[in-house]
Image (cartoon, rainbow, N blue to C red):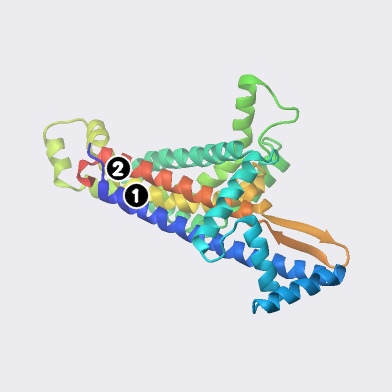
Amino acid sequence: MRLPIRTLARLVAVYLGVLLVIVLVAGASSNKIAWEYTHEAVLHIRESNPAFYAELERNATREGLTVEQYYHRILTKAKGVRTDNLLLMGIDLLRKSFDYYRENPKYDFAHVIKVTLAVMGLAMLLTIFLGLFLGFKLANGRFLGTVEGLARFFNGLPSWWIGAVLIAVFAVELGVFPIAGLRSTPPKEGFEDFLDVLWHLVLPVTTLVFVYVWEFVVTVAHEVRNELGKPYVFTERAKGLPEGLIYRKHVLRNVSIVLSSFTVQKFVEMFTDYIVIDVLFGLGGLGTLLRASFVRTIVPAIGVVVRFDYRLFFVVTLSIATITFLFSLLLELTKGLLDPRVS
């Protein structure tokens, strides 16, 4: 197998483009926050230390700047931050953010990534497996039209609604599965802990599979129909090859090539739904961290005040973009293995 160089180069170019956008937005956010901090600091100095403010005003006037501009320059110079280049500001912000959360015991990013990959991996594998199995079964069946209707129906439903229904039925009413969380209290040990984690993942994984499996079934069924009508299938049948061998050796291989491209598209869509499901079931993955980047504080005189933790937000966003890129890269390599013509 040769590497599909053009496809991989295109994927890398897309990822670098997304990375550039994230870095530039991070730089712009850093610049805006620095100016807001400068404005509040200057107001505080004017109220609490008029003598120091007067000195700042004299120095700023001498250099033809406002007090805020002068103080902003002092602060950024003292912290070694370049304000003339958004790209460098964004890189600096992301580097400091990763360092901060790596050393912060409150955030275990290794655990967060493991949870995210486990849920997404299980959901995607089950969706592909069920899509292939049911798609082959329904390719020449009467119920394909019904499944197409189900695909349109579930495609229009929000994933959190399906998750809420599953919680209401199987967790609250029947008490079969846990409502939320990743482990029981107190936590189990050894293999029992592994089984306990899988038990807690049943409802969130089922929610994601329930949303996307119908589209996979329809796609596989139509591709199987298309392949079965091609001349090479009639030739193989004329040779006397068993039907099961034709399906496994030829039809499955060609359907998998199309399915790999479809899976990349659906993985990105599933990731957006996973973020909501992660928060709904309290799994502690990237969705939970993304929600934590919007800090809500109750101020009695005002109400609920939402603060934006820009450092955490950009770290989570970059992690999501990187996981999506690596998954897409893996699928393209798989496609090249299935079909050398892709190279």
Q: Quadrant of the N terminus?
A: top left
Secondary structure type for disc 2: helix
Vertical order, 44 against 135 (above or below): below
Q: Does residue 72 appear anywhere in the picture? A: yes
- C-alpha span from label 1 to label 2: 8 Å
Can you give x and y, in whole percent of width and height, for residue 221 in the image?
33, 47
Decide: marks 1, 2 in contact (CB < 8 A)?
A: yes
Residue 47 in percent (x, y) is at 85, 71
Residue 76 position, x and y percent, is 63, 61
Q: Is residue 161 visible?
A: no
Q: Amino acid at mark 1?
A: Ser
The crowd level at tag 2 (other Cα within 10 Å; few <14, some 14-19, many 20+) is many
Left or right of 200 on screen, residue 119:
left
Horizontal and vertical percent position of residue 37: 71, 65
Q: Residue at x 63, y 51 (%)?
A: 312
Q: Which residue is mark 1?
A: 261
- Residue assigned mark 2: 335
Decide if residue 139 is on the left or right side of residue 68. Answer: left
Q: Amino acid at mark 2?
A: Lys
Seen in the picture, residue 304 relative to 235 is either above or below; the reply is below
Quarter holding residue 331: top left
Q: Nearer the viewer, residue 315 or 134?
A: 315
Disc tally is 2
